[in-house]
Amino acid sequence: MSNPAKSIRVGTMVSATKGEAAKRIGEIADLGFESFEPFFWQTTNGQDLAELGKRCREAIGDRDITISTLGMFGNPLEETDIDLQSLQGWKDCIDNAHHFGATCVAGFTGRIRNRPLTDSLPRYRKIWRELAQRAADKGVKIAFENCAMDGNWATGDWNIAHNPDAWELIFNETPDDNIGLEWEPCHQMVYLIDPLPQIRKWAPKIFHVHGKDATIRWDVIREHGIFGKEKFVFMRTPGFGDSNWTDIISELRLAGWSGSIDIEGWHDPVYRDALEMTGQVHALNYLKGCRGGDFVADPA
């Protein structure tokens, strides 16, 4: 019998930039992860992605684990050497997603550096209309992570898809059905946006979810504000932050959403380094509990 609980899977991200993704999947595949998101930082380093996809699937073997999404994080809108590598990486990930079994490629939109967000829209339209068509021809969706990378409306150097006002603009420029979001609550919380109502409005555009949370120190905000010397928010692994993931998953289910929540580690100030995998497995089990726990079939 199929497991309806797994219409929403819980997994984690694995770095693929230096060709280590298949090895890493083999190392942690038995810890209970139900999906993986191999991801590249700025460049694929000229790897044969068809071969890498084959090795990743071989590392999974006959386990009930999927790869729904590849990550390609860089700035494909500008034209320095590394930016052009990022753009080529997007093309290569789109063309080779099927070798991983993936149907989505996710990452940053890119940005015209150090300019107001709206100055990026003409270049965004040119690049992403072309990539959207390329992806549509391959049956692939494109999902933009909602991370500002320390940018804002006035300036930045990575991504313009970081708040709902920007989403309205970019989806107007690219109304393609296969362009959407790689959403997570954390990146809204660090700008003091309530993430939950977003699901009700934006669920049709949410193609992939990152498992990352935040802790907001309201006492610091009240005393020091958000532009002072004291850190007012920390990115957290799910289960250690402020979000009620039971509510998040419930809202996703109510919207008819299915897909993978892949944990994005390496940000938690406590569960990192030697405690990284402790934190990730805690998050894995926590999110499975928020999903409703183990599936129980009606014996009738």
Image (tube, rainbow, N blue to C red):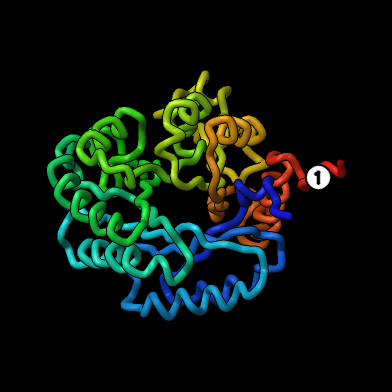
Frontmost residue, 104 versus 86: 104
Q: How many marks?
A: 1
Left or right: residue 47 compared with residue 111: right
Q: Is residue 282 above or below residue 60?
A: above
Give how far across and how far down residue 4 sits, in percent.
67, 46
- Let me know if residue 298 appears in the view: yes
Amino acid type at circle 1 is: Val
Could you say which quadrant of the image residue 99 lies in? bottom left
* Identity of the residue drawn at 56% across and 48% down: 261
* Identity of the residue drawn at 30% across and 57% down: 135
Frontmost residue, 211 versus 70: 70
Left or right: residue 6 compared with residue 1: left
Left or right: residue 296 compared with residue 137: right
What element does badge 1 sit on? loop
- Which residue is labeled 1 in the image? 296
Work out which residue is located at the far top of the displayed protein and give it.
Answer: 222
* Identity of the residue drawn at 14% across and 49% down: 126
Work out which residue is located at the far front of the displayed protein and give it.
Answer: 300
Give how far across and how far down residue 163 sits, in percent.
36, 33
Name the quarter where the N terminus is drawn: bottom right
- Let me know if residue 229 appears in the view: no
Q: Is residue 177 above or below residue 61?
A: above
* Identity of the residue drawn at 59% across and 76% down: 59
Give how far across and how far down residue 186 sits, in percent.
50, 38
Could you say which quadrant of the image residue 277 lies in? bottom right
Q: Is residue 263 above or below residue 300?
A: below
Left or right: residue 276 compared with residue 44: right
Give how far across and how far down residue 157 sits, in percent.
26, 48
